[in-house]
Image (tube, rainbow, N blue to C red):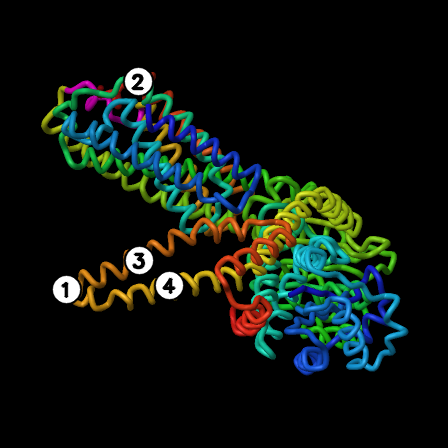
Amino acid sequence: MHLVLIGLSHHTAPLELRERLAFSRTRLRAALATLVSRTEAGDAVLLSTCNRSEVYATCAEPDRAATALAEVLCNTQGVPLMTVGPYLYTRTDADAAQHLFRVAAGLDSLVVGEPEILGQVKEAYRVASEAQGTGAVLNRLFHGAFGVGKRVRSETALAEGAVSVSYAAIRLAKKIFGDLSHLRVLVIGSGEMARLAALHFQSQQVARLSVTTRSEDRAEALAAEVGGVAVPWSTREIALADSDVVVSATGGGELVLTRNVVATATAARRGHPLFLLDMAVPRDVDASSGDLAQVFLYNLDDLRSIVQENLARRTGEIEAAEAIVQDEVEAFMAWMRSRHVVPTVVALRQRFEQIRRSELDRLSSRLSGLPPDARARVNEVTRLIVEKLLLTPTAQLKSIDDRETMRAYSAALRRLFDLEDEDMSEADTTRRARTET
Amino acid sequence: MIALALYAVATAAYIWRFVRRDQPGRHVPTLLLVAAVLVHTFVIGMQSVQVGAAPFAGRSGAVSTFVWMLALVYLYTEISTEELAIGVFIAPLLTALQIIPAFTAAAEEHPALLDNPLFAVHVASVLLAYASFALAFVVALTYVLLFRELKRRTPGVFFSRLPSLQVLDAMNMRAVTVGWACLTLGLIVGTWWVTQARLYAADDPHVRAMSLLDPTILVACLSWMVYTLLLVGRRTRGWGGRRAAWLSALGFGLVLLNFLLVGYFFSRSHGFV
C-alpha cells in the first residue's frame, strides 16, 4: 500500500486558481465520497484552506491514483485539468508524509509558523473520518502530523510572537490587561485600518467597542458593521477616559489626542493603564503622551518593528522545526515498512498456534486425568513458549529497513513454514485497515 | 545542608526552564522545589523535637523557617495560578537565605520565657508575613521589568515569559494583603505576649527592652505603616501597578533590613538565643 498526495498551494498556484479549487465545508463531504468512489483510492483526506487544496490518499499504484485523483478533483469543481495541471504537485510515501508534517508544523505556510493551519489539518481529518472512514495508514499519518505540530510549537519558537500588525496589537493588549473580555475599546476613525483594528478587537470578545469619527454617519456605519456603539466626536475625550484601549487611525494630519487630553484622561482613570495605538500616518497622538505614567503608546512603526523581529526569530527556528519533521517522517516510514511484514507475522503466529492446539488436542486423553488448574497451567505454559519463540523473529523482521530484504525474509518464512499466499493476506490486511483506528 | 543543595538544584532547574521554555520536563523545577521543601520540613521537625519547641528563637531557626514558609507560599501561588516564570526569581532568594541556617549552628536550647503559645503565634505570623512580603517584592520586581519593556516599546525576554501586568499586579496585591494581615496579627499578639511576660518575667532584660524605641519593633511598625499606606492608597486612590510595585519593594527592603541586620545586631529585645 502506498501513500499519495496531489494538490496545489500558494507556492505553486495564483489566488484565482486556489479560489476555484477551494472546497466549502458543506461540499467537502460530497467531494470526499466522489474521490474515493471514482478512483482507486482506499481512503482519502481533503485539506482545503485559502492557501492550499490537497488530497491525501492510500492506493496500490501511486502514479495511476494521482492522475485519477487530479481528474476527479478538477471535475468536481468544474475546472479543466489542463488549466490546473501545471500548478499541481504530486508526492508519494515519505515525501507525502514529509509534506503533511511540514504543513502541520506551519513550515509550508504563507506566514511561517502561523498557528491556524494545525486546526485546519485536524478539521480536514475529522471530516474525512466522519464522512467515509479513514484507514490505518491515514490515521497514523494524521496523528503523526498533529504530534509534529504540537512538538514544533512546544520545542521551538517557530510559532511565537505576533507576525501581523493587528495580532501584535492584540498580544500587547493581552500582556498589559490579561483577560480582554473586560476591556473597553475606543476606535477613532472609520478608514480601513480603523475597521480592521475594530474587527480584530471585536473578535476577542471585548466588553465594549466604541467608534468615533468627525462624521457621525460614518461612525454609526462602522459601529453597526463591527457590532459596536457610535460615540459623538464632541464627547471623545470623555470616551477616552472611559476606555482601556484606544486605536486612533484618522490620519487627518492634525493631532487628535494631545498630551493634555491624554493626561486629563489618565488622571481620571485612577492609575489604570491606558493602551494607545496610533495607527495613523501622519500620527494622530502626540508622541510625548507615551511619557505619561500608565500610558503605553505604540505607533505603526513600533508594531511593524515587533512583527519584523518576530519574523526574523521564526526564521531562526526553521532548522530545529525541520529536524523534528525529519524525525517524525522516519518514525512514520519505519511504521509503514513494518506493515509489509504484518501478513507474514500474522500467518506465522497462526501456524504456531495451530500446531500448539493440535498437539494439545492429541494429548487431550492423557491430560484429562489432570486436575483443571494443572490443565490450565499446561495450556498457559505452551502459549508462553510459542510467544517467546516468536518474539525475536517478529522484532527482527519489523526492524528491517530495506523493502527487498523484507520481501526475501517474508518469502523464506512462508516457504519454510508453508504459510498461505501473501497476496491473499495483504488483501485481508487492507480490509482490516479500513476499520482499524 | 541537604535542603540547601536541593534549593540550589531547584534554582538551576528554574533558570533552565526560564531560558529554554521546554514543554517536556516543565514541571521538573517545581518537583525539585517540592522535594527541597519536604526535606526542609523534616529538618525543621527534627530540630523541633530536639529543642522541644518550634525552632524560631535563634537567627538560624528564624531564617530557616522564613525560607520554608516562603517556599510554601510560592509553591501555593505557582500551583494555584499555573504561572511558572516567577520561580526563577524566588528560587535564588531561597537558596541565598538558606545559606545562613546551613552554616550557622541551630539553637540547642529554648528559654523558658518563650514557652508560651502567644510567642509561637507571634513569630509564626510575623514570619509568614515576611514570606508573603518577599513574594510580593519578587512579583513587584517582575512587574517593573515587564513594565519597562512595554513602556520602551521593546518587548523581549520578559514579554514572552511573564504573565500580564494585570496578573502580576493582582498577585502582588494578594501577597501584600495576606502579609499585612499576618503582620497585624503578629504585632497584636506580640504586644499581648509582652504584657503577659511583664507579669512573670519583669526583670528579663529582653522584656524590659520591649518598646517602640527598640530598633526591631520600630522597623517592624514602619514596615506595617508602609504596607498599610499601600493598601489604603490602593483602596482610596487606585494605587496600583508601578506605584504599588515600588512601595512593595520599599516595604520588603525594611523587612529584610529588620530581619537580617537590625534584629540581630542592634536589637536589645529580640536576641533571646
Spatial CA span between label 4 and label 2: 76 Å
Name the residue at 24% across, 28% down: B56
Q: Are there few (<14), some (14-19), or many (20+) residues within 10 Å of tag 2?
A: few
* Amino acid type, residue under disc 3 in the picture: Thr
* Amino acid type, residue under disc 2 in the picture: Thr
Image quarter (top left, top right, bottom left or bottom right) of the N terminus of chain A? bottom right
Name the residue at 48% across, 47% down: B83
Residue B213, horizontal then vertical, whole percent: 31, 24
Q: In the rendered image, which quarter is residue B220 located in? A: top left
* Amino acid type, residue under disc 4 in the picture: Ile
Q: Please name the residue that numbered disc 1 is placed on.
A: A371
Q: In the rendered image, which quarter is residue A2 located in? A: bottom right
* Amino acid type, residue under disc 1 in the picture: Pro
The numbered mark 2 sits on a residue in which chain?
Answer: B
Contact? badges 3 and 2 (CB < 8 Å) = no
Q: Please name the residue that numbered disc 2 is placed on.
A: B104
Element at label 1: loop
Residue B192, horizontal then vertical, whole percent: 20, 36
Tell which circle, 1 or 4, labels the residue nearer the N-terminal end: 4
Q: Please name the residue that numbered disc 3 is placed on.
A: A382
Element at label 3: helix
Q: Does the magenta portion include B212?
A: yes
Q: Mark 3 or 2, which is nearer the eye?
A: 3
Say whether mark 3 and mark 4 are on the same chain.
yes
